[in-house]
Structures are given as C-alpha cells and as structure tokens.
Amino acid sequence: LGVVECSAKHREIIDFYNEAKEPSAYKMSVYDPWCAAFVVAVFYACGYKGAVPGWAECNQIINGFKEKKKYRVNDGTYQPKAGVLRLGQER
C-alpha cells in the first residue's frame, strides 16, 4: 500500500521480484508495468514460490495457469468471501 512508481519502495519490490523470480522469467526494470510482478513477489514472500508462473506479464501468467489446468473464469456464480483460499473452500 502506498507504493508509487519509481519510488524506493517500488524499486524494492522490483529487486525482490528479480532475486526470487524463476530463472527463465523476465528481468524487470522500474520502467515496466509491475502489477503482475508484484503479485508474483507477494506469493514468493509468503513462501509460495512457483504457485504463480513467475512472469511479469499478465497474459503469460494466465497462459501458465491454463497450461497447468488451473485457470478458471468466474462466470458470476461464485462470490468470493474473506478467508477463502480456493474456490468453494473456507478457512
């Protein structure tokens, strides 16, 4: 929260992503769109390295989940709730 592009915190997130990323993943710079890299970095920081395909581009992450047969599109019938870890599973 409160991270502004090109700030010290932004650079910290990019550095963390680059250090933790999969070896074949794209190396980020502070000039790249960073929303997908942020999501990957959060998973890595929480100990879930490899849970999200380690790319810094949304379409590549989606394609990675499709390859793993883990991609779902919400058709509007599922409403997420606090504490849900997986579709249909409460904490």
Image (cartoon, helix red, strand yellow):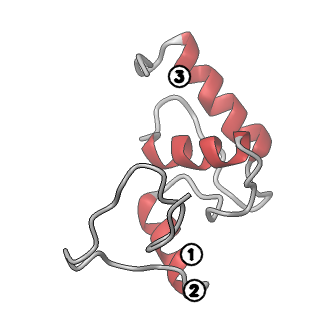
Instruction: Say the numbered circle drawn on residue 67.
Output: 2
Q: Which residue is mark 3?
A: 10
- In three-dimensional space, the C-alpha distance between marks 1 and 2, rounded to whole angstroms, equals 5 Å
Question: Where's residue 90, x and y in %?
Answer: 50, 63
For mark 3, does the 10 Å Cα neighbourhood hold few (<14), some (14 to 19), or many (20 or more) residues? Answer: some
Q: Is residue 32 above or below residue 87?
A: above
Instruction: Say the numbered circle drawn on residue 64.
Output: 1
Q: Which residue is outermost to the left?
A: 76
Residue at image point 67% right, 63% down: 51
Q: Who is closer to the viewer here, 89 or 27?
A: 89
Judged left or right of residue 67, residue 5 is: left
Question: Where's residue 31, x and y in %?
Answer: 46, 32
Q: Amino acid at mark 1?
A: Gly
For mark 1, does the 10 Å Cα neighbourhood hold few (<14), some (14 to 19), or many (20 or more) residues? Answer: some
Residue at image point 71% right, 33% down: 16
Q: Who is closer to the viewer here, 56 or 1?
A: 1
Element assignment for label 1:
helix
Determine contact: label 1, label 2, CB under 8 Å. Answer: yes
- In three-dimensional space, the C-alpha distance between marks 3 and 2, rounded to whole angstroms, equals 30 Å
Determine contact: label 3, label 2, CB under 8 Å. Answer: no
